[in-house]
Image (spheres, rainbow, N blue to C red):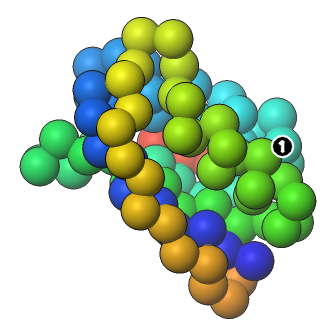
Amino acid sequence: MRLHAYVSGVVQGVFFRKNTKEQANRLGLKGWVKNLSDGRVEVVAEGEESKLKELLEWIHQGPPSASVTGVESEWLESTREFKGFRILY
């Protein structure tokens, strides 16, 4: 499965990407996370559905310094294009 999510709130400058990468690696997921110019964070992750649901649950909270106000997410077919989980700049 593939999870594609956009996270809103105070999610930039609070180590959201770094912590998302750590969570994804812990869960054995592959994909990427990046900041968007509108202040949101975009996440694309692939792996087992149960692990993706764990990541999505974590995304709704984020790291302690973040303040998540909204998450838009969609489920897609896995493309298996990723070798690991990266932070994109």
Return the x and y of residue 24 as percentages of the image width and height.
71, 43
Return the x and y of residue 70 as percentages of the image width and height.
37, 47
Please identify the quadrant where the N terminus is shown: bottom right
Q: Residue at x 77, y 46 (%)?
A: 54
Return the x and y of residue 3 as percentages of the image width and height.
61, 68
Residue 88 in sight here = no
Instruction: Out of 82 and 4, give the one closest to the viewer.
Output: 4
**Count of labels in the image:** 1
Question: Eyeballing the image, is 50 above or below 35?
Answer: below
Q: Residue at x 42, y 10 (%)?
A: 65
Residue bearing mark 1: 27
Question: Eyeballing the image, is 87 above or below 67?
Answer: below
Question: Eyeballing the image, is 49 above or below 80?
Answer: above
Q: Residue at x 70, y 67 (%)?
A: 46
Furthest residue toward top: 65
Q: What is the secondary structure assignment of the residue under circle 1?
A: helix
Q: Is residue 37 left or right of residue 80?
A: left
Q: Is residue 50 left or right of residue 44?
A: right
Return the x and y of residue 39 as percentages of the image width and height.
17, 41
Question: Eyeballing the image, is 63 above or below 28?
Answer: above
Furthest residue toward left: 38
Quarter-wise, where is residue 16 in the image?
Answer: top left
Disc 1: CA contacts within 10 A as few (<14), some (14-19) or many (>=20): some
Q: Is residue 14 left or right of residue 37?
A: right
Residue 15 in sight here = yes
Please identify the quadrant where the C terminus is shown: top left
Q: Residue at x 76, y 39 (%)?
A: 25
Instruction: Out of 86 and 77, give the one closest to the viewer.
Output: 77
